[in-house]
Image (tube, rainbow, N blue to C red):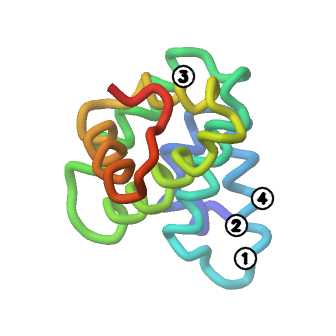
Amino acid sequence: MADSLHPYQDFAACHPKLREAVSEVVAYWEPDAVPITVGFGSIGRALVQLESDLDDATLDQVSRLVEHSLSGSGPEADAVATGLLEAICAQSVRAPSAVARVVSRLGADARAYIRAWDAFTGTTTPGVT
């Protein structure tokens, strides 16, 4: 299981409930590897669903990981953008206040991606400035 958590392990380490969410998606896909965008999408959904259980320090830790991932190139950067960030945005109608809080804690690169995604989709994600 530890190897299957590899691309997500830093995010999973931020909070026990995030670890649970990652473990659930990994278990669902076993024995196959989780498609990386799907894995990061599950983290994005979990952030919004668990928002009331996550303190600001945890959201700030996640934000640093997002910014670090986005500063790179390759599959992880793409998956964090198209998986995690777009999954957060997709919950804007269902949970606008949770989305706003999560997004407001994200860094500049993540918010820039969300603004571009909003322009592309014609939506406005709560919390993006």
- Name the element at disc 4: helix
Disc 3 versus disc 4: distance between alpha carbons? 24 Å
Earlier-in-chain disc, 3 versus 4: 4
Foreground residue, 78 or 4? 78
Q: At x 50% / y 52%, what residue is drawn?
A: 84
Residue 29 disc label: 1
- Image coordinates of residue 61 in percent, x first then y, are 44, 28
Q: Is residue 18 left or right of residue 76?
A: right
Residue 26 disc label: 2
- Name the element at disc 2: helix
Disc 3 versus disc 2: distance between alpha carbons? 27 Å
Foreground residue, 6 or 59? 59
- Name the element at disc 3: helix
- Image coordinates of residue 12 in percent, x first then y, are 59, 44
- Disc 3 versus disc 2: nearer the observer: 3
Location of mark 3 (residue): 101
Q: Is residue 5 left or right of residue 26?
A: left
- Image coordinates of residue 119 in percent, x first then y, are 32, 51
Residue 73 picture quarter:
bottom left
Name the residue furthest front: 122
Earlier-in-chain disc, 3 versus 2: 2
> How packed is label 2: few (under 14 Cα within 10 Å), some, or many (20 or more)?
many
Is residue 89 positioned above or below 48 on the image? below
Foreground residue, 65 or 81? 81
Mark 2 and mark 4 in contact (Cβ < 8 Å)?
A: yes
Inspect the image, locate mark 4, and give the three-letter code of the amino acid beneath it. Answer: Glu
- Name the element at disc 1: helix
Quarter containing the N terminus: bottom right
Is residue 85 positioned above or below 98 on the image? below
Inspect the image, locate mark 1, and give the three-letter code of the amino acid beneath it. Answer: Trp
Earlier-in-chain disc, 4 versus 1: 4
